Image (cartoon, helix red, strand yellow):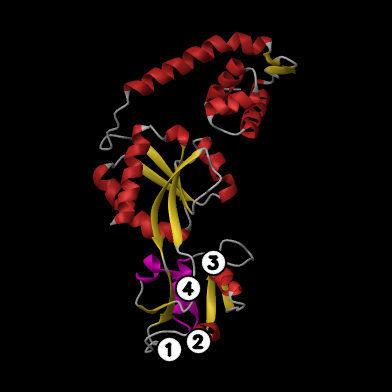
């Protein structure tokens, strides 16, 4: 096994297990879950072809190979830590980094054009990768440093994460500008329910916030099209009589007729999420500030 093929984060896990002699305490030290530590240990065992630790009543005892390599591991981690501490100041103008974001296509549409414009001006060495990570994997990805930030709804049961609200937004009903109902001052609930609707969801089935709100009233809308992406839904609306219910921040970008909803739907609450390990990192602090400012302008 060549060093360049190894994930260097695994040696942080090795060091934590060696010092704690316990997987749970190692997880607490690293601020990740115990299954994540177990998974990292399994990967190391396969890579190094050695059990590395044996479980005993007194804890995880290191194998001879582990004892042999740990002085060098300690030294390497100490050197790396010292190097990072010397770079406590983050200079965006000279920084070289890949910013990895998890968000859906609506957030991409709203954020990425302005974010790239700002980065080109202030931090030209920063590149961006955007992809969607399912919510049940978000904490794991952030803890593993394979992801810098998530843009999503609040995760109330995620003590390992910091969260900052970026915006909250009401939903509007979108119709094409020459729709038969476009000249009206407003929509009644009955008119809304008589419309045929587009529903946007990354899931193959299941209700959204709008449907849950209607269900509480004992009503149901007629969904004629279910799509994965917010980008395509307005294009469909502008060519058909279908209606689309979306947050105002997206709806206001299109030349369409917009109506307030004739029933109550909880507002969309967008939060920026990051792992506690990155909270004091100068690069993370600067990027958080930029992202929050973009949502406020």
At horizontal 37% and vertical 23% (from top left) the residue drawn is: 84
Q: Quick check: marks 1 and 2 in contact, CB under 8 Å?
A: yes
Magenta highlight on residue 272: no
Residue 49 place in picture, x, y as percent: 69, 21
Local crowd size for mark 4, using a 10 Å CA cut-off: few (<14), some (14–19), many (≥20): many
Residue 8 place in picture, x, y as percent: 52, 26
The nearer-to-camera label among 3 and 1 is 3
What residue span does the magenta drawing correspond to?
A: 230-253
At horizontal 43% and vertical 89% (from top left) the residue drawn is: 181
Local crowd size for mark 3, using a 10 Å CA cut-off: few (<14), some (14–19), many (≥20): few
Local crowd size for mark 2, using a 10 Å CA cut-off: few (<14), some (14–19), many (≥20): few
User: Earlier along the polypeptide chain: callout 3 or callout 1?
Assistant: 1
Magenta highlight on residue 244: yes
The residue nearer to you, when weighing 178 against 19, is 19
Is 201 above or below relative to 46? below
Residue beneath disc 2: 191
User: Earlier along the polypeptide chain: callout 4 or callout 3?
Assistant: 3
User: Earlier along the polypeptide chain: callout 4 or callout 1?
Assistant: 1
The residue nearer to you, when weighing 192 against 151, is 192
Q: Quadrant of residue 36?
A: top right
Query: Position of 18 compared to 232: left or right?
Result: right
Give the numbered dot on residue 181. Answer: 1
Residue 83 place in picture, x, y as percent: 37, 20
At horizontal 45% and vertical 76% (from top left) the residue drawn is: 261
């Amino acid at each position: 096994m060549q060093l360049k093929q190894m994930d260097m984060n695994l040696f942080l896990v090795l060091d934590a297990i060696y010092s704690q002699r316990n997987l749970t305490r190692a997880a607490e030290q690293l601020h990740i879950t115990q299954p994540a530590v177990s998974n990292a240990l399994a990967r190391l065992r396969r890579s190094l072809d050695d059990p590395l630790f044996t479980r005993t009543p007194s804890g995880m005892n290191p194998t001879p190979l582990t004892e042999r390599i740990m002085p060098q591991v300690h030294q390497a981690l100490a050197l790396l830590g010292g190097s990072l501490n010397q770079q406590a100041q983050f200079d965006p103008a000279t920084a070289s980094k890949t910013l990895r974001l998890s968000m859906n296509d609506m957030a991409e549409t709203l954020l990425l054009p302005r974010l790239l414009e700002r980065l080109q001006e202030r931090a030209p060495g920063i590149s961006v990768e955007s992809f969607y990570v399912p919510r049940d994997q978000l904490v794991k990805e952030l803890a593993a440093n394979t992801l810098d930030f998530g843009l999503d709804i609040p995760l109330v049961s995620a003590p390992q994460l910091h969260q900052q609200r970026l915006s909250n937004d009401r939903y509007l009903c979108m119709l094409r500008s020459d729709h038969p109902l476009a000249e009206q001052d407003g929509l009644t609930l009955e008119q809304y329910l008589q419309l045929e609707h587009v529903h946007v969801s990354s899931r193959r089935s299941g209700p959204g916030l709008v449907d849950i709100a209607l269900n509480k009233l004992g009503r149901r809308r007629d969904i004629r099209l279910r799509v994965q992406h917010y980008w395509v839904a307005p294009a469909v609306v502008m060519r058909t009589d279908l209606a689309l219910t979306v947050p105002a921040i997206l709806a206001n970008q299109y030349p369409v007729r917009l109506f307030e909803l004739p029933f109550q739907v909880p507002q969309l609450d967008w939060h920026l999420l990051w792992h506690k390990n990155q909270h004091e990192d100068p690069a993370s602090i600067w990027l958080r500030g930029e992202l929050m400012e973009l949502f406020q302008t």
